[in-house]
Image (spheres, rainbow, N blue to C red):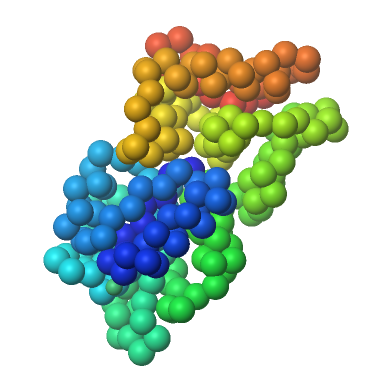
Amino acid sequence: MRILVVEDEPQLNQLLVKQLQAAHYSVDSCLSGTDALDYLPGAEYDAIVLDIMLPGVDGIGILKHLRGKGDRTPVLLLTARDSIEDRVKGLDAGADDYLVKPFSFDELLARLRVMMRRASESVSDVFTIADLTVDCAAHTVHRGGKAITLSSREFAILEYLVRNRGRILSRDKISRHVWNYEYEGGSNVVDVYIRYLRKKLDEDFSPKLIHTIRGAGYVLREEP
Ligand code: CA
């Protein structure tokens, strides 16, 4: 899952990036609202961590811009302790949640998980399809009761597939949610990783769960 961090305080920005990466997210970050407006059209984020007080366009401005276009990407606002008015404005402008600085990183991660659960219309971070179980909080995978070890990239792709179970996802869409801007890979990299996933998740099990839809992409679902 891919996250955009918009925070003008360089140290906090760096810390957020490091911690989110450690939590297996793919992360882009920028230091101003103007840069955020450049990042947004080229990517598909699963969540945005957005500071309210920013140079150039502020967080509320970005939020209004997004929601004005009908973009419903979950947004977590970062606000100063004494800015109740900003928080209210932010929530009214379509923010999903906010955190008051200074905040605990565990709480930030928990709130991001809540927002992503809502976005994937799920009540928990654990997804089950046939005998496959994927725990997106604990980063564990089981099939047929057997623990399966995945690399972090393999897990990232599986997480995106499982959060969108039953939906056909193009290669482009998958890569936009799994890699960040710094990544320069070939166009067939998604196919390569799907092959790895099939080997680990589908080869020795039935029914097959990862399906190729010719000319469209991939879907994770149980087929009769
Ligand atoms: Ca700020």
Q: Quadrant of the C terminus?
A: top right
Point out the residue furthest to the left here: 56
**Percent of width and height locating residue 179:** 42, 35
Q: Of residues 13 and 119, which is closer to you in this image?
A: 13
Q: Is residue 159 left or right of residue 37?
A: right
Q: How many marks?
A: 0
Q: Of residues 81 and 118, which is closer to you in this image?
A: 81
- Establish if 159 lies above or below 130: below
Point out the residue furthest to the front here: 11
Q: Residue at x 85, y 32 (%)?
A: 145
* Ligand 1 position by quadrant: bottom left
**Percent of width and height locating residue 2:** 43, 44
- Establish if 197 lies above or below 46: above
Residue 94, image quadrant? bottom left
- Establish if 196 lies above or below 1: above
**Percent of width and height locating residue 16:** 44, 60
Q: Residue at x 55, y 61 (%)?
A: 109
Is residue 96 visible in this depiction of the protein? no
Point out the residue furthest to the bottom here: 82
Q: Residue at x 35, y 27 (%)?
A: 184
